[in-house]
Amino acid sequence: FLYVSCWATGEMRQYDVSDPFNPRLTGSVHLGGIVRQTPHPKKPSEPLNGGPQMVEVSRDGRRVYFTNSLYVPWDEQFYPEGLRSWMVQLDVAPQGGISVNRNFLVEFAGARGHQVRLDGGDASSDSFCFP
């Protein structure tokens, strides 16, 4: 699957690219964003600001993690009221489809979560380092 983060709208998209000339949208979730500020299911009365930024896929492809902070100057420009940083987990269906893990919400009070580093590497950048 290919994952596309649309931070301004707060959307994370999943595409099936088994036929690279005909990608097919197989999943979409909304969290945060400039426009919607969609809340996490764990705290439905608290809108999230920021949107999907830094994305990591587990080596088995069953989980996707993302944070909402990219660079301090950009965060301050797009979120002048202040960025409340967070990290979430999406669960991936084997045949396509993603859903927000309702029990996984990490909030970084006063700090900004950026790169997600998974123990043993991730599917996108570190897999070559481990057997």
Image (cartoon, helix red, strand yellow):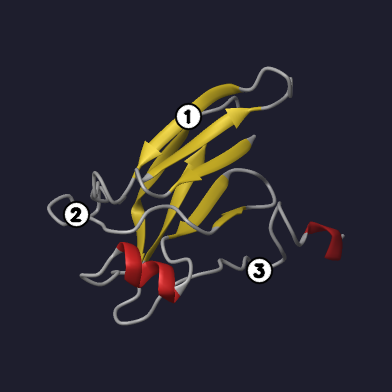
For badge 1, the amino acid type reads Gly
Q: Name the residue under label 2.
A: 47
- Residue 111 image position (x, y, % from top left): 37, 80
Packing grade of label 3 (10 A; few <14, some 14-19, many >=20) is few
Q: Give coordinates of residue 104: x percent, y percent.
A: 37, 57
Left or right of 33 in this view: 54? right
Q: Quadrant of residue 29?
A: top left
- Check disc 1 and report the residue beneath it: 27
Q: How many labels does the image show?
A: 3
Looking at the rendered structure, the kind of residue marked 2 is Pro
Write the residue at 20% across / 70% down. 81
Indicate the amino acid at tag 3: Asp
Q: What element carries label 1?
A: strand
28 or 92: nearer the viewer: 28
- Estimate the x, y position of residue 9 in percent, counting from the top left: 34, 43
* Image marks 3 and 1: residues in contact by CB distance under 8 Å: no
Q: How far apart are marks 3 and 1 (CA)?
A: 26 Å
* 86 to 9, vertically: above or below: below
Q: Which of marks 1 and 2 is nearer the N terminus?
A: 1
> Considering only order in the chain, which callout, 1 or 3, is on the residue closer to the N terminus?
1
- Identify the residue position indicated by label 3 in the image: 119
Residue 36 location, x and y as percent?
Answer: 24, 44
Identity of the residue furthest to the left in this view: 45
> N-terminal of the two: label 2 or label 3?
2
Q: Quick check: can you spot residue 121?
A: yes
Instruction: Name the quadrant of the N terminus.
Output: top right
Answer left or right for 88 relative to 42. right
Disc 1 versus disc 2: distance between alpha carbons? 22 Å
Q: In this view, does 23 lie to the left or right of 50?
A: right
> Observer-nearest residue: 98 or 11?
11
Residue located at (33% from left, 47% from top): 31
Point 25% across, 69% down: residue: 80
